[in-house]
Image (cartoon, helix red, strand yellow):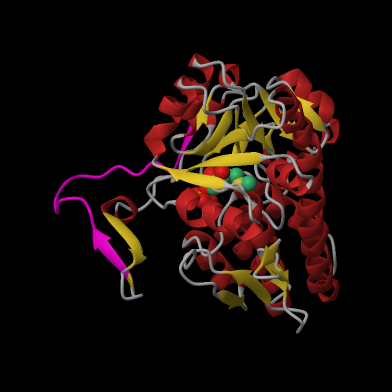
Amino acid sequence: MKVDGRHFRSIWLEPDGWSVGAIDQRRLPHEFVVARIESVDAVAEAIRGMLVRGAPLIGATAAYGVALAMRADPSDSALDHACAMLMETRPTAVNLKWALDEMQRAVRPLPSAARAGAAYARAGEIVEQDVAINREIGRHGLGLIEAISASRRGEPVNILTHCNAGWLATVDFGTATAPIYLAHDSGIAVHVWVDETRPRNQGASLTAWELGHHGVPHTVIPDNTGGHLMQHGRVDLAIVGTDRVAANGDVCNKIGTYLKALAAHDNRVPFYVALPSPTIDFAIDDGVRQIPIEQRSADEVATMTGRTADGRIETVRVVPEGSPIANYGFDVTPARLVTGLITERGVLKPERAALAGAFPERIAAHHSAPARIG
Ligand code: MRU
């Protein structure tokens, strides 16, 4: 996608052919800063500290982490160490495990001398695959927006989204935003309600920034506004991303998604989830009980960071000193509240049979010997 007329992806291989560039998402929307990452330790820190974030981008970054590790030391023990360390960085997005499994499959059978080259090649493929998948998600989701636009006789289609499942959360295009960008680019009038997404404000800081740079009409709303808008017919459909979809169609996404799905169900607003197939976890059959939910630092809730009137970036405390804080990063929306899953192979029912039927090779891979991690 474009930033001030220049094409950017969220992550790339630098011209030196080995180090990795990424947009530092902690600094947006106030500053556009690019980070250069040169070691697997720095990759782990970038994922843990959310310099990069979003399930598909976490996977792509981890893939480059393995490549950097193999460049420094192509031994088995270095591979084990890199994968174990990266796997620990964030627990919920299953794209991380998927990418590490893929990298190990590509690298482990090879002699040491061939490992670094193969790792960079596989990481590059994972990155390109993400872009291609998101294009297809966009194509399939576009049909949903077109149908609503036709029934509204050209009035803007109002789409609610939560968190950032845009191009910053992937390599390019985004998942939930891919159909929106395509619709906008093809002349369909769209308007996006952007949930601010406390505590880290990925909606207010990142989704609004992305949409604004692409010229997509949008309005940022406090997280608790969606239900009110739905009751008053101001939301035509919701499209969100996801960090892990269980085999039964339960969907894990940024905290607060479940409440939006409940409100959508109560108001008969279609609630779609956009996902690339690496986000499906065929090892888990009950999302509510089995998906690990990340708990993050209390500071994310206790403080807010923003730009002061005189241009300084400052962090201020908004919670009384001493009040206990809980910071659950994600929640699970049961499949019964999901209208459909927008995947690269079409819009699917949130059911095991539909997922397994569309991605039989993932089932086969799941039943084959798992790659070793650590
Ligand atoms: O904690 P984050 O910012 O990594 O959470 C991101 C989300 O919840 C996204 O909605 C999800 O990863 C889908 S991204 C295409």
- Which quadrant is home to the N terminus? bottom right
Q: Image check: 110 left or right of 34?
A: right
Picture quadrant of residue 240: top right
Q: Is residue 254 in view from this perspective?
A: yes
Q: Is residue 317 magenta?
A: yes
Q: Image check: 224 left or right of 279?
A: left
Picture quadrant of residue 70: bottom right
Q: Of residues 225 and 125, which is closer to you in this image?
A: 225
Q: Position of residue 81 (x, y in %)?
A: 60, 64
Q: In the rendered view, would you say 314 is above or below 356?
A: below
Q: Which residue is drawn at the image coordinates 62% and 78% (left, top)?
A: 38
Q: Which residue is drawn at the image coordinates 83% and 76% (left, top)?
A: 113
Q: Image check: 324 left or right of 172?
A: left
Q: In the rendered view, would you say 32 is above or below 217?
A: below
Q: Position of residue 166 (x, y in %)?
A: 62, 50
Q: Which residue is drawn at the image coordinates 59% and 47% (left, top)?
A: 217
Magenta extent? 314-331
Q: Of residues 156 and 261, which is closer to you in this image?
A: 156
